[in-house]
Structure formats: C-alpha cells, structure tokens
Image: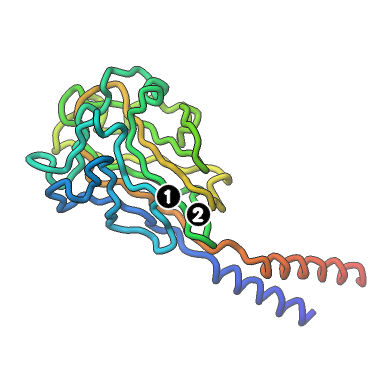
Amino acid sequence: MELMKKLTSLIASLVCASSAQAALILDFDFSGVAGDSLFDPDTFELTDVDTKDANLDLLVGLNAFEPSVLNSTTAGGAASNDWNLVNWGGSVSATVGDAVAGNRFISFTIQAASGYMLNLDGATISYTAYRNGSGAPEKFATLAVVGGGGFSAADQLDAGIDTPFGTPGSGSTGSGNTETWSDTFTGAEWDGVTESIEVRLYGWDGTGNMHFSDVKIDGAEVVLVPETSISMMIGLAGLGLIIRRRRV
C-alpha cells in the first residue's frame, strides 16, 4: 500500500512538471509599427511578434495571400500602427466557399518545438481590425489544418457560421469602429498536437480595405510530450492495483 502511494505521488509530480497553464502563446501586435520593414518584401511575412511561447515555433509568419496582387503594407497615413490589406476580396464573394476558392486569406503556421505538444481545445484566436470603406469584407471565418494540405469550408473552427462578426461587418467603417472578434478551437483533436498547424482567416462579401492591429492565440498550452517512463509508471501503477484487488 505504501509503495502504491509513493508511486502514485511520483507519477503525479512528473505529470504536473510537464504541464503548463493556459496562456497567451502568440501575439502579432502592430502597435508602434510605422513602416513595412517588418515584412519580407516578397511575401509580406511578419516574423517579429510581440509575444511567443518559448517552446512554440513560428514556421511561417503572418502573411497575405498572393502579395503581388494584394497591396499589403504598414506604411503611411491611416496604415500606421496596423496592417492595411488593400483589395482584400478582389471580387464580391457570397460565401466562405467562394473565399476559399479565390484564395482570399491571411495566414500563419505554427508548431510545438521538438519534444513539446500543443493543447488548443478551448483556446481562442482573435483579431482586432476595422473596415476602411463600405466595400470592405463584411464576413470572416477562421480555418485551420493540421499537418499541411488543402483547405475547404469544412475546416472552419466554427463550422457553418456565415454571418458578420461584430462591427467589422454590417457596414460600419473607420478606425473609430475598431472591433475585436474571435473563434475557438473546439474538440479533443486540438489537444496533443505535435504536427504543424496552419491558421487562415478568410474574408468575403466585399472588396475593400481591412486594417488589422492585432492577431493572437490565447488560452492555449505548449507542454512537454509525456515521457515513455511516465507511461510505464502509469502502467505499473495500474498493474499494482490489479494485483492488489486480486489479493483482496
């Protein structure tokens, strides 16, 4: 009995040592940005982040689709302190499926460092932005894919949501109507992820400018992958309980 108590205590301490508190693990904050020097001139990829978990790898920074087509910049005028996405839609789209087919998105790709895994179930990805002009997109959806591959409307975090998110939709425009909205990773499949995750925000139902000042993932964990020794100890503990019950 005493041996079982010690073994259980050891397992608990090892498990706790490999865990972490849900926290802000990634934050692209454009506050104070006055030029486009943070972006690669060919891809507009933002690799400089305000916050990033030490055990999270940023494989591809925040970037825009087809930069040769999309005039994305942080320089000048109203674009100070934000990321101005010009001509977001390219053409008026009616559904998220149209946006996916037209490759109208911003994205980034993350992965837990070697020996670590991502726990995202219940975590949120949020955006702070405003619409510049009545032609700007009114509807948005976050899509995420594990391990690479193609995207489809079925990859929405909140599947089936084809409605505007707060003030960025419904015709409101201008910096005075800056709004923060979010999507949630939901389901056990988002826990224990060791592969890469590409996250995309698609916009549709409009063609004008969007000004983003913040994109972040909060309420997530980057934790150690359980060691084989821990799994063995758990197995031994279970075996010990079985033996003890048989003796009783």
* Residue under the point 33% across and 49% down: 216
Seen in the picture, residue 61 relative to 105 is either above or below; the reply is below
Q: Position of residue 171 (x, y in %)?
A: 21, 24
Find the distance from the CA under tag 1 to the CA under tag 2: 10 Å
Name the image quarter holding residue 205.
top left
Outermost residue to the front: 42
- Most extreme residue toward the right, as rendered? 247
Secondary structure beneath disc 1?
strand
Q: Are marks 1 and 2 in contact (CB under 8 Å)?
A: yes
Residue 160: percent from the left, percent from the top? 46, 26
Asked if residue 188 is positioned above or below residue 103 in the image, the reply reads: below
Using a 10 Å C-alpha cutoff, classify the residue at mark 2 as few (fewer than 14 neighbours), some (14 to 19) or many (20 or more). Answer: many
For the image shown, how many numbered marks are present on the structure? 2
Provide residue 193's location: percent of width, then percent of height: 54, 51
Identify which amino acid the numbered label 2 is placed on.
Leu
Q: Nearer the viewer, mark 1 or mark 2?
A: 1
Residue at point 27%, 48% (across, down): 46
Say whether residue 191 is left or right of residue 32: right
Nearest the eye: 30 or 121: 30
Residue carrying label 2: 118
Quadrant where the N terminus is found in the figure: bottom right
> Which of the 4 image quarters holds residue 170?
top left
Q: Position of residue 184 (x, y in %)?
A: 44, 42
Question: Which kind of residue does numbered mark 1 sit on?
Answer: Ile
In the rendered structure, the answer to whether residue 121 lies left or right of residue 243 reads: left
Residue 110 disc label? 1
Q: Quadrant of the C terminus?
A: bottom right
Please give the name of the residue rendered at 38% of the width and 50% of the height, measured from the top-left corner: 217
